[in-house]
Image (spheres, rainbow, N blue to C red):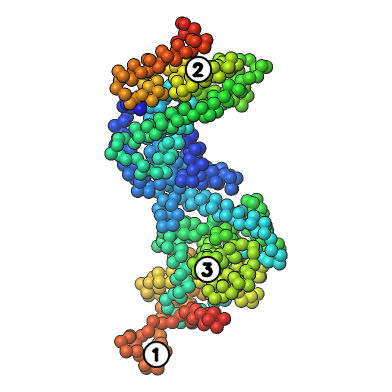
Amino acid sequence: MRLTDATLLRAAANRAARRPAYLGYDMAGYREVIGEDPAAWLGIDGEQLDRLALCRTPRRGVHFAHDILTISTHVGVDPLALVGLIRRVEVLAELQWATQRLDEEPEPDRAPAVLAAARDDIDEYTALSDTRAPASGLPGWVQDAVNRLWAVAPVSMQFPRDLDFAVLIGLPLALVELPRLSLHAISEWLTDHKVDLNVADQGDRRLRACLIALGGVGLIFVDAEDDPTQRRVSLGHEAAHFIVEYLLPRQEVARRRPELLELVDGPRPPTAKERLSAVLGDVPIGLHTHLVDHGDGRSGDRRVVEAEWRARRVALELLAPQSVVLERVFQAGQAEPDEVRRLLVEEFGLPVSLAADYAEQLVILAGPPRLGLLDVLGTTQKGSSSREPETSAEDARDRKSDVDSEDE
Amino acid sequence: MCRQADPDPGESELADLVPAAHERLIAGDRVASEELAALLLMPLVERLERRWRRWAHTDVLYDTAVDVFLAYVEAPDRYDPELGSLLRWLEVAAQRDLTNRYRSTRQRWAIELAPTSSIGDPERPATELPPSTNPVGLARVGPDPANAERLDALGMWRRIRQAFPDERERELVWVCWVEGEHSSDRLAEVLGVDHLPVEQRRRRVKDARDVARRKLRRIGLIDDEAD
């Protein structure tokens, strides 16, 4: 039997599947973890799959986007499908492992260390009243969250801004689209993929999107039947939840008290000594929330309302960055709320209700400069401008929470 | 250790494309490995087939070529372009691996016993392969399975081990009288004298073959006409 070029490359691709340095290893992982044919997911033929398998696996981190695009162009694969495949393998393998650990070491009366946040199948809801105060610039936590994504992902200045590629490149997240998304549908999907997390144990309901985070990775579910505008907002919202409520606090634990990291993901509650260590180090070992179980966001649960507010604020910054929108507003001379809202809907692709709230804030920012406290008192500091940087409601809120933390 | 291979067709093309792809591989390019596979694997296999005729068109040879290539991609800086072409470097590495494989008695038996043992079905006609047998596997190096079975039954290997206590001599017997190899280069390689000048090498090979032939006659494994 004599090999042809094609059969020899097939044999090489098969052997590359056993070596983690090759993309073939990720393809084999897809077959094993997901149980499906990677060629079908990628929409390519066997020859393309062999060529893909012989490429080296993309480097994670700052090279990830570049490597994905290079490989995709070379082999003729959709880059979004390729990064989606790689993330699915990574995330599901981690979730399967993490949930097995939870099963092996069950702790009575303790919810699993899972962040689950859902965006219900209703119109936008979030308490924004306290953000309507005059504001300029971004609060530090919003900037941190946005920076976390764009540190690795390529920043697109095309609007409406689709976040799929950026989210998959920049965050350890996989994206799953299900028709008629509901808690029950998500639970079924997780079971089918050997992730033992019953998110529907509190009953079923329709959702626009949902985030499941555990073990440092996350799954975002979106409704496959949503229109592009809703889908865009849903993805930004859940990605924001992941960054703000999970990734950044988890990274903080890893950085400052790595010995406590197992409490973040593991089934074990902290010992008294570990609690003390966390308090002394001011690290958030109690970062897990189970937002799905806490109602629809209007219930008055402060944690849920605040989490929703934060996610919405970051999502807005991802989809329609304040500085970019304000620049457009100034260029067009559109300082009226209706005009700004129309700009947000037509150019940035926001839903009308979300755009209306955001427009009101932006109009205030686009207005004439406001006097600061020092101006009012007439006591400017020596050497400084009489116009101090203006203070946003969010900055004030940040400072208040800092003070609260210190008080605690 | 290996004789210089004749230039392959298209080698000038390789000479242009391969160094550039190697440099990109070193620099972290993710697709250079696929390009190099397309450029190098078949020429590498063809070179190995010319040297290992008995293993030509076998999994052993293909797997060795592929493994050597994949290992190179994982550590490309082990190859020094100053020392010659990448194809030649891979060929030498594959040659070394094949020789090691060949010399490993355990591996040799693992390779050869599978097809030999798999035909021991008295109900099955000799012209038929057993079910689930891979024809590529059966085409691997080794004598005709029927002969091997007969020779096993005769206790051939026990007698050869007694007559040829030196492992290199036993390998010589295998290569000459089982594989039917006549190339003095190959036999010099087996004897570990391939580094010698040509005339000296040929003389050493001839002497070793003559000694081995006499021993085989003495223990009754070949007759006077056989060689």
Q: Is residue A229 above or below residue B201?
A: below
Counting from the top left corner in percent of width and height, residue A202 is at 70, 64
Disc assigned to residue A374 = 1
Q: Nearer the observer, disc 2 or disc 3?
A: 2
Residue at 57% over, 44% down:
A31
Type of amino acid under label 2:
Ala
Q: Is residue A223 above or below residue B13?
A: below
Q: How many marks do you count on the picture?
A: 3
Type of amino acid under label 3:
Arg
Residue that badge 3 annotates: A257
Type of amino acid under label 1:
Leu
Q: Nearer the viewer, residue B71 or A64?
A: B71
Disc 2 and disc 3: Cα gap in Å? Answer: 70 Å
Q: Is residue A276 visible?
A: yes
- Quadrant, the C terminus of chain A: bottom right
Counting from the top left corner in percent of width and height, residue A18 is at 51, 41
Residue at 40% over, 44% down:
B75
Disc assigned to residue B163 = 2
Residue at 54% over, 24% down:
B112
- At mark 1, the secondary structure is helix
Counting from the top left corner in percent of width and height, residue B180 is at 45, 16
Counting from the top left corner in percent of width and height, residue A180 is at 63, 57
Q: Nearer the observer, disc 3 or disc 1?
A: 3
Name, please, the residue furthest toward the top: B225
Disc 3 and disc 1: Cα gap in Å? Answer: 41 Å
Residue at 64% over, 67% down:
A269
Q: Nearer the observer, disc 2 or disc 1?
A: 2
Mark 2 belongs to chain: B
